[in-house]
Amino acid sequence: MASPKDNIQFLKGIGPAKAKRFNALGIETIGDLIYHYPRSYEDRTTMVFIAELEVDCPACFKAMVMRVDKTHLIRKGLEITKVVVADSTARLNLTFFNNRYVAEALRRGEEYIFYGAITGDYLGYNMTNPVVESPYDPPLMTRRILPVYPLTAGLSNKAVTQAVRQALEVCGAPPEILPPEILQTYDILPADVAYKAIHTPMSQEDLAAARKRLVFEEFFIFSAGLSLMRARRKEKTTVPYLNRDMGEFFSALPFTLTGAQSRAIGEIVADLGKGRPMNRLLQGDVGSGKTMVAAAAAYCSVKNGHQVALMAPTEILAEQHARSLTALLEPLGVNCVLLTGSMSATKKRNVREQMASGEPLLAIGTHALLSKGTAFGNLGLVITDEQHRFGVGQRAALAEKGENTHLLVMSATPIPRTLSLILFGDLDVSVLDELPPGRQGIETFLVNESYRTRLNGFVRKEVEAGHQCYIVCPAVEEGEGESGKAAEVWAETLRRVVFPDLQVSLLHGRMKGQQKEEIMAAFSRGESQILVATTVIEVGVDVPNATLMIVEDADRFGLSQLHQLRGRVGRGSAKSYCILVSNSLNPDTRARLKALCKTTDGFRIAEEDLRLRGPGDFFGQRQHGLPTFKAADLSMDMGLLTEAQTAAAQWIEAHGHEDSPAAGAIRERVRALFDDGNVTMN
């Protein structure tokens, strides 16, 4: 027997060259291969007669070889072999291109199983390159429910299927890790049955039961990991904050906090006084006032003699936070410093020296806060803004720059409850479900290119009223695949042709930090009336005078992303609008965009976005810290997630600290899953 840790080259027929192709799929060991689940299945169990074959409908049939012609070379690199087969109902011409071995292996007068689709019409039918198997061999590509695997260049589905079958024969299924009582309570298949059935299902019922097992197992392991994190967090201790008088902070605010903000600040301040590290998610819709809550947390920490690190995903947002928080907190005695990658070496060195000295301060920055050269002398609180853009490992890396630091995770992206369970299952949650007084509703409309003249007129009307406009494009420049209208070209068109009398500025993520800051600052001062941008302005940018958001090729964005863009306007007292421009005629696309026009509830929009786009596309990039689930689908398996969470919590409570082999096996799988998801278990 082989070990799951054995190199894939242990298997027959897999040499160094083929192993590299498997490596491209993340498969290096036999165990990796067994965990390489099919992405879909084809039911090839039904056999038909030749006369029953339908054009363009693949099917299996049994037929006798009547004639095999000699292979001919049509041109360099293209060989053709003609074969005639027949059953009791009809004859059929088969054509094999560049498949001399298969075609010439067929013996006249013998029967074979074929799988393929016919082409042609009543004048004659043909089948090209069908799958061929002997009826006396075990079903591999015919007469079965065929798994269809994720592939890479040079690796066929047949090659993967053969390798998986061999792996199960020489290694067997992974050992059982789910306790017997859980298998019984939740009607879960044993491991040996499930892992065989997921690769070689005998029926659709077998497949459904196997998939249930594997999804439940993944969710159980993940939930057990979160439970272990929570348990370890409760074991950690830190110095409780004794000075929790927030009166001076509240008195300095130029406005009254909402009830939700006051409640969240109370929860955070209470956490800081408990003597164990806070792990809290602050979640709120666009404009709900998360920055003021973060400011309160930072004030409390600095007043207790500690340092605070606030990490933002972009330099624009970091610089904006630095300006607003410095203005608010420095009069209260809180020193605020900024650290970003684009700063000069001298400025970086000066800021890092302050941080390393341990003096109480608020350090605001981007990923530069994570760099090896950045050290904190007395880090007490870490705040991450737009957490889903970092990944859980980055949040942990920043927290590890201190000892048992408090953590406040902020997200302006409303995250569906289903995803929150996965992304932030180890955190306590505070929700800002109120908007500050005076925030205007934003009217949203969907139009196509035929409205361009009227739309340009509306832009001019808003500008003449003293307001400003964002125009967001999906691409920076032309030629970026099928990415839609390009910001650079469209900005130039607006400057030269459409609005030659107005100031049109351009902002995109490829610009250097200093240049972006200058452009954004100029727009904030009203020096340009129109800002053409990419989604670099999606989060956090605050210009109260901007009242119009136009999104070009809106069908190329997710609903939650569009909702974030819409949130850049409506931040002042004037009426604001969002115009979605799309020429798509796809009814599903238009229904999706119209849904955004009907509601400004970010959580409803997020749930719809998850349902339509799935978790893989929800954030538009894979920097959101989701662990790698191989079997589970977050958009359809939430019932199993709930069951698995219950089962895992009960198991951890009863057996989490045991040294038994069963408990050790579960902890080992927890570590493996969380390593894949870039999550620390320390």
Image (spheres, rainbow, N blue to C red):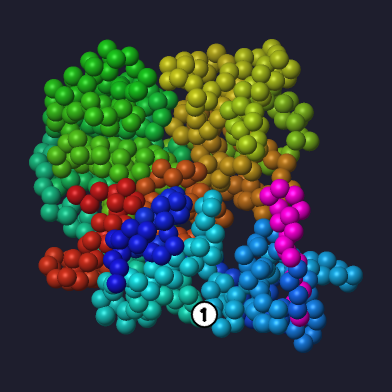
Residue 550 appears in view: no
Q: What stretch is highlighted in magenta?
A: 70-86
Q: Main secondary structure of the magenta part?
A: strand
Judge by depth and name the residue closer to the eye, 648 or 10.
Answer: 10
Judge by depth and name the residue closer to the eye, 68 or 124.
Answer: 68
Residue 427 appears in view: yes
Judge by depth and name the residue closer to the eye, 127 or 608.
Answer: 127
In the figure, is residue 154 to the left or right of 478? left
The answer to whether residue 83 is magenta is yes
Which residue occupies the extreme right position in the image? 123
Mark 1 is surrounded, within 10 Å at the Cα level, by few (under 14), some (14 to 19) or many (20 or more) other residues, namely: few
Q: Is residue 234 above or below residue 389?
A: below
Q: Where is residue 663 in the image (x, y as percent from the top left)?
A: 19, 68
Q: Position of residue 245 (x, y in %)?
A: 17, 35
Q: What secondary structure is marked by label 1?
A: loop
Q: Position of residue 19 (x, y in %)?
A: 42, 54
| Residue 158 occupies quadrant | bottom right
In the figure, is residue 540 to the left or right of 86? left
In the figure, is residue 525 to the left or right of 71? left
Amino acid carrying mark 1 in the image = Pro
